[in-house]
Image: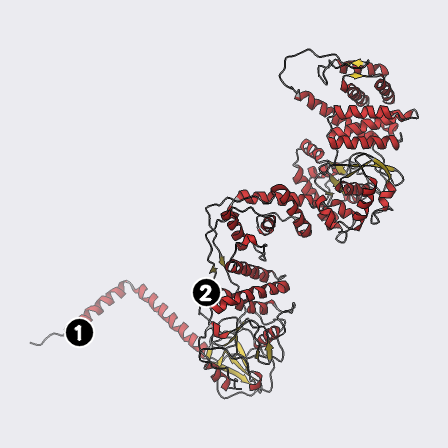
Amino acid sequence: MAKKNSTGSGIIIIGLIVFAMAAKYWYLFVAVGIVAFLVWGIAKLAKSWATSEIPEKDLDIRAATASNSVIDTPKQHARCAYCNAEGLHSVLRSSDKTIDFHCFACGKNFFIYKFDSNKVTTNYQPSAPNNSTSQPIPSDATIFEASAQQPKSSSPDALWVPCGRTIQHAGYTIPGGLIYFGSGLKSVTRWNEEPALIDTSLPVISDNPDREGRNMGYWPSYTQIHPASRAAYLDWLSTGRKDPKTNIGYVFIYFYGLERRALADARDSASARNDVPAIITEVKRLLSIYGENGSFHAYAGKFLDALRVTQTTVPLYRTSPQIDSCSWEVPLTLKIALGQMARDDIPVSSEWALAWAENDPSMPRRMPVQRCPDEFRELFRIRYSEKFGDGFKLKPNKTRIQAAYRPASSSFGGQVDIPMPDLPDITRLTGPSSKINDLVNSCTDELEGYSRYLGRNPDGRNSIEATSYLPQPLLKKHAGKDFQRLINWLNGQVTSDAPVSAPFSSIVQQIPSINRDGFGKKEATAIANLLGKMSIGIEPDPRFGCFVPKPEQDVVLFRIGDSAPNSPSAEYSAATVVLHLASAVAGADGSVDSSEERHLEEHLEAWLHLTSDEKTRLRAHNQWLLSSYPGMSGVKKRIELLNNDQRVSLGRFLVGVAQADGYIDPTEMKMLTKIYAMLGLDTQSLYSHAHAAAVEPVTIQAADLVRPQGYAIPSPPAKPTEGISLDMSSIEAKLAETVAVSAILNNIFTEEEPASSSVPVSEPANSDVSIAGLDPESSAFMRMLASKLIWARDELEKLAADHNLMLDGTLDSINDAAFDHFGGPFFDGDDPIEIDPEIVGRLGSAGLDEI
């Protein structure tokens, strides 16, 4: 019996199973077949493309083309000038000077220049372990064989040219060292060639160097840039590395080598560590030349920051801050110094506090800091010492300092961790930084007016107007010659604390730069501001009242304190206008009784609770009234415009002033009678007002004091009290009355402004018309601001509150709109706030509907 063939039976069974599956799932087999066919077709097409002839292109890196002759060999050994791939590249054409290739690796076209051997000779001998020297590179095809025999990897120390050494390469003599030179140096990551290495095996076209860097990429590497670009780089190195017009890419290639030497080689090489001080000096030099380039400034600054930390052997706070970085991070040097101060319980000095203010990105950097950097630094140091003395101490926190440097060079492949001492990161705390932040804002506010003036007048830094905006501590150093001349003259005039009279023209003569042709309120205000910086007050002062000194008049000069206000309070304004009215009344009959004026002055000082500086100014103002009586011009006409209620309010107010000491003597009654007559009030109402004021249950002074015969205030009913009790509602009511009456009197005594000083803005019939693109509310507020040129901040705060506006936000919007439409700010200063008369004039002349 024959033996069965089991293998054949198995095949039959499998075939039947497959056939049965195909019959049932035929659509799956069709899909698989289609996919297989597509894969086969794509592979065949790719093979066809790979074997097709490479199309000839315009070679963007060609230097020149001679009469080309096609060579017989289609491929030849070479090294790509772009990707550094070495091997058999396709030959596109050959001429007397060049051979054009197509790289098999990166697909770019490149060419090799056929050098003469005397053009590539080097006299520099790297201290390689085998003491081998670079050999002249043969011309034509043998160049590729020579380059193929270069070592695959070399020691960084062997290829590093120390500081001060000179080399020659490709016809260039390169002094100074601090470069990698030779061949075979791998990157720090050892993935590719070191981008900073001057590879002696690569061609250099020195006939037409690419100094403009037209062929330079974003992340340049010596091994991959065009041969003409290599020539430009070598030329820059040979000419001192200082041409400010050179392409920044060449500077970066050089910088890559400095990064590697200090951050990578120095880890294991003592000679590299010895090079770090020279590298720091060199990077500082490069920053002084190329620091305007933002990218280089950022990388070089952070690089120096990292090196200083690793090189310093003493606490950083014992040295002056040296911070060159420009980034959105707190510089490492600053972090280390603050951490060391916290660890050692050392106060932050003014110099390090300033470094913190200038280099912490969270700190404000408003326009005055940028426009007036020297003035800001000096003022910050002064104010910091005034507030903190030797400085404030820092309390260590738990967060520790960690640091890493991200090099510019691709050689590192990523960031480099920098070993840090165990120190707290103080910059993470909000308390200390807020102290610096507050002081920065305060100093910036002080420089705001000065900065805005310079913004409008870039060449006016030494003018008297600019000096008038400077904070007082900066005057001695930053003021111009006009200031020195004026202060010398003033010291000869004001020799004591007593007020003295002087011709205003004499003051103006000391300031040659002042505008004399259109002298008005703006110029007088600038002089008053300037005198205030010297602790000298002047009356009349346009900042404190309605009178502007005229060159032909006398003014009163007097000493004031450093903290004296530069704008009037409501009480002071009321006191001055009452004095004006008393002078007008006293002068109406042809004489001014100085004893009456001084008597009234004493009443005003006591009743209105003026500060010592306000009392001094009021006496000086009264002295000016007595010596330079301003007259009644326009006063009677303005009084006629008051309604009866306003006149009665004025009369009652003045009666209250006269009764401030508990009685009205005959001299006061005589003056009040004249005032009532001027106001058009019946003298009988004077006595009724005096009686009404006398019976008010408000104790102004104790009633048991002995008084001369007059109109006494009855004593109020005795009430048992402990200590001093104040009726706040009565005080608020009296202050409100003072402000209201002061406004009425100011309108009476405000002088007519010369046409050159300002142009008043009339309220348009349609108050909803927008000004300079502002919303209706801000436009209305801007119209109100234009009604006068100087505002006290508390006035504007009340005005803004009355109109449901946020003062600071509204003022910022108005100034932004003014910059956009008029080319400058609508106002200057913080307190007082000064309105620009030029813009006010433009508002009035153009018409609000046209803006």
Asked whether disc 1 touches disc 2, contact meaning CB atoms under 8 Å apart, the reply is no
Residue farthest to the front, as pictured: 496
The kind of residue on which mark 2 rests is Arg
The kind of residue on which mark 1 rests is Gly
- Vertically, is 562 above or below 474? above
Q: Is residue 161 left or right of residue 790?
A: left
Q: Position of residue 554 (x, y in %)?
A: 87, 37
Q: Which mark is residue 267?
A: 2
First-in-chain label (1 vs 2) = 1
Label 2 crowd bin: few (<14), some (14–19), many (20+), radius 10 Å: few
Quadrant into which the N terminus falls: bottom left
Residue farthest to the left, as pictured: 1
Q: Is residue 783 left or right of residue 120?
A: right
- Picture colour scheme: secondary structure
Q: Residue 288: which quarter of the image?
A: bottom right
Q: Nearer the viewer, residue 544 or 781?
A: 544
The residue pinned by badge 1 equals 8
Quadrant into which the C terminus falls: top right
Q: Position of residue 471 (x, y in %)?
A: 71, 44
Task: Answer yes or no: is residue 441 visible.
Answer: no
Task: Answer yes or no: is residue 797 visible.
Answer: yes
What's the residue at 47%, 72% (across, down)? 156
Disc 2 is placed on an element classified as helix
Q: Position of residue 362 (x, y in %)?
A: 57, 48
Give the alpha-carbon distance from disc 1 to disc 2, as whole Å.
73 Å
Q: Position of residue 113 (x, y in %)?
A: 56, 82
What's the residue at 75%, 53% (across, down)? 458
Q: Is residue 263 left or right of residue 752?
A: left
Residue farthest to the top, as pictured: 717
Disc 1 is placed on an element classified as helix
